[in-house]
Image (cartoon, grey):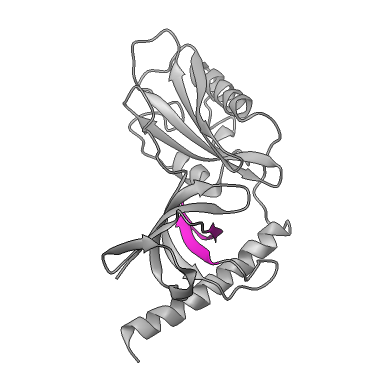
């Protein structure tokens, strides 16, 4: 049996298992905790609590249990509680600031990116905070530290490598092709691909309008586009060799 055949079988098996797991999460089993409200308020409230604890002389954010907040993704909680960080992994400042400012960089129905900086400070250190929508609410899925003044510009709100799949169980709709991908170290993510006459595909070095009739199960791809409530509005798909 060839390596490609083995890989296809393994990828398909894993993908189906991950979809089933995603289905149970969708049904509410072991789901990520979320909160209702405006994303900017959610970020500000979490950061204000963290800042107050960081400024305190009698406690720390860790002692207050903020690093284990269920509002954070599992992978983010794990990262924050690592023993060694060059700077505070939430505030992203070498010196604890006095006050913070929050602004939204971009927002869609399913994802938000915010930047938290120090008020009245010459420091350009900043926190880039990502929120993800789930079950009518939001949770903080990632925090990254940056030395730049501005968050990096994003041409696409969805930019992921993964594998194509169309043979999917309910409640997924088999009329769509799906991309199965890993995000923030967690497997089992999937998104339907919304193809239009403007969706371009690159196959064997040749770029043309995407034709789903030529797609194959478990093909390794790079998908770029705009994430919407119903799926990825595909701008570009590159098929890996």
Q: Position of residue 64 (x, y in %)?
A: 59, 29
Q: Nearer the viewer, residue 44 or 88?
A: 44
Q: Residue furthest bottom?
A: 1
Q: Is residue 48 above or below residue 185?
A: above
**Quarter of the figure with residue 147:** top left
Q: Residue furthest right?
A: 27
The residue stretch that appears in magenta: 177-194
Residue 92 visible in the current orientation: no
Q: Nearer the viewer, residue 237 or 218?
A: 237
**Quarter of the figure with residue 24:** bottom right
* Quadrant that contains the N terminus: bottom left
* Quadrant that contains the C terminus: bottom left
Q: Residue furthest top?
A: 120
Name the side, left or right, on which 77 lies relative to 124: right
- Please identify the dominant SS of the magenta region: strand
Q: Position of residue 168 (x, y in %)?
A: 61, 73
């Amino acid at each position: 049996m060839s390596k490609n055949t083995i890989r296809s079988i393994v990828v398909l098996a894993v993908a189906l298992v991950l979809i089933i797991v995603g289905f149970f999460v969708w049904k509410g089993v072991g789901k990520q905790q979320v909160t209702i409200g405006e994303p900017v308020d959610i970020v500000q409230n979490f950061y204000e609590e963290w800042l107050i604890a960081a400024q305190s002389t009698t406690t720390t954010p860790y002692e207050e249990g903020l690093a284990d907040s269920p509002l954070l993704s599992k992978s983010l909680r794990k990262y924050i509680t690592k023993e060694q960080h060059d700077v505070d992994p939430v505030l992203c400042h070498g010196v604890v600031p006095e006050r913070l400012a929050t602004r939204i960089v971009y927002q869609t129905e399913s994802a938000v990116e915010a930047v938290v900086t120090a008020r009245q400070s010459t420091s350009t250190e900043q926190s880039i905070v990502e929120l993800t929508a789930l079950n009518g609410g939001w949770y903080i899925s990632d925090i990254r530290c940056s030395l730049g003044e501005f968050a990096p510009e994003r041409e696409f709100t969805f930019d992921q490598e993964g594998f194509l799949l169309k043979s999917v169980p309910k409640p997924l709709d088999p009329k769509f092709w799906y991309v199965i991908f890993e995000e923030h170290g967690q497997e089992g993510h999937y998104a339907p691909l919304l193809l239009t006459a403007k969706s371009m595909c690159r196959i064997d070095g040749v770029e043309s309008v995407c034709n789903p009739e030529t797609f194959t199960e478990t093909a390794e791809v790079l998908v770029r586009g705009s994430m919407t409530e119903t799926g990825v509005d595909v701008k570009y798909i590159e098929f890996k060799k």
